Amino acid sequence: GAVVSQHPSRVICKSGTSVKIECRSLDFQATTMFWYRQFPKQSLMLMATSNEGSKATYEQGVEKDKFLINHASLTLSTLTVTSAHPEDSSFYICSANDRGRGHIGRSLETQYFGPGTRLLVL
Amino acid sequence: TQLLEQSPQFLSIQEGENLTVYCNSSSVFSSLQWYRQEPGEGPVLLVTVVTGGEVKKLKRLTFQFGDARKDSSLHITAAQPGDTGLYLCAGASTGFQKLVFGTGTRLLVSP
């Protein structure tokens, strides 16, 4: 249980184009999803917190007009990198909180991570 | 700003050796999690500790949460090449959904 998927797993795009990354919770409902960015050999950096049915909360220094987040349902959040540039090339990872709706043994604060999406902007 | 410092940043050892990774902060956390991440993949949860002084064992891995819930350690006994990866600690504060991730420890276990 507690599986999170991401699509695509890797994407190459030209500078100036937009790229959409999907994050889905497959066997549980996630009222909250998180988007992280990870540069090579570094830790995860939280970009934004995505709440179902409301606007995302962005971390300081993250441009909300550049990284558009939509959380339209309890199992899907999307991150769109608009007008991508080479410096946006990175590994993007989502995670979802399983709020423990009737599931025994799951912590309220446990996040389950997707497999990540490798973005390369040429 | 909450920060979690991990040490060492990088560790290269031979198969069979023991090692300890530390995760330290000046902040108190309601729970702390340890993840292992392999290249090109998302982090995989290893354990969650919630009680000060708590010790949890997962086969050859032993996790401890500090009494004051500000620090944690991960000890691996008889390391194997399959233990190679990036180890991340992450702390959660009561009432907040966000995790604060540590700086990471990259482990390389050679045969």
Image (cartoon, rainbow, N blue to C red):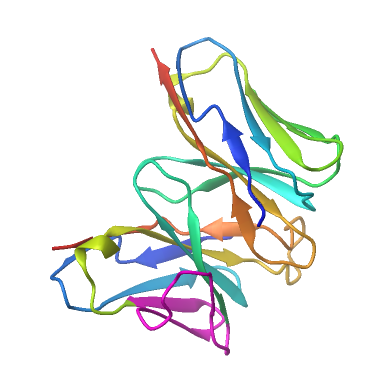
Q: Can residue B66 be seen in this view?
A: yes
Depth check: give the residue in front, B59 or B94: B94
Identify which residue is drawn at 59% across, 14% down.
B18
Question: Is residue B59 shown to the viewer in this render?
Answer: no
| A108 up-or-down from B71: above or below | below
Residue B109 rendering spot, x and y as whole percentages: 43, 19
Q: Which quadrant of the figure has residue A10?
A: bottom left
Q: Residue A73 colored magenta?
A: yes
Q: Nearer the viewer, residue A3 or B15?
A: B15
Q: In this view, does A92 lie above or below B34?
A: below
Q: Within the image, what quadrant is residue A104 found in?
A: bottom right
The magenta segment: A52-80
The N terminus of chain B sits in image quarter: bottom right
In the rendered structure, the answer to whether residue A50 lies left or right of residue A85 reads right
Looking at the image, residue B27 sits to the left or right of residue B83; the answer is: right
Which residue appears at 86% of the width and 36% of the height?
B67
- Residue A16: give x, y in percent of width and height: 17, 77
Is residue A78 within the magenta segment? yes
Q: Which of B58 and B72 is in front in this view?
A: B72
Q: Quadrant of the C terminus of chain B?
A: top left
The location of residue B80, given as percent across then percent down, is 48, 19
Estimate the x, y position of residue B40 in percent, counting from the top left: 34, 47
Residue visible at 57% across and 13% down in the picture: B78
Residue at point 73% right, 72% down?
A101
Label total for image: 0
Using residue A28 as the reference point, say whether residue B55 is left or right of it: right
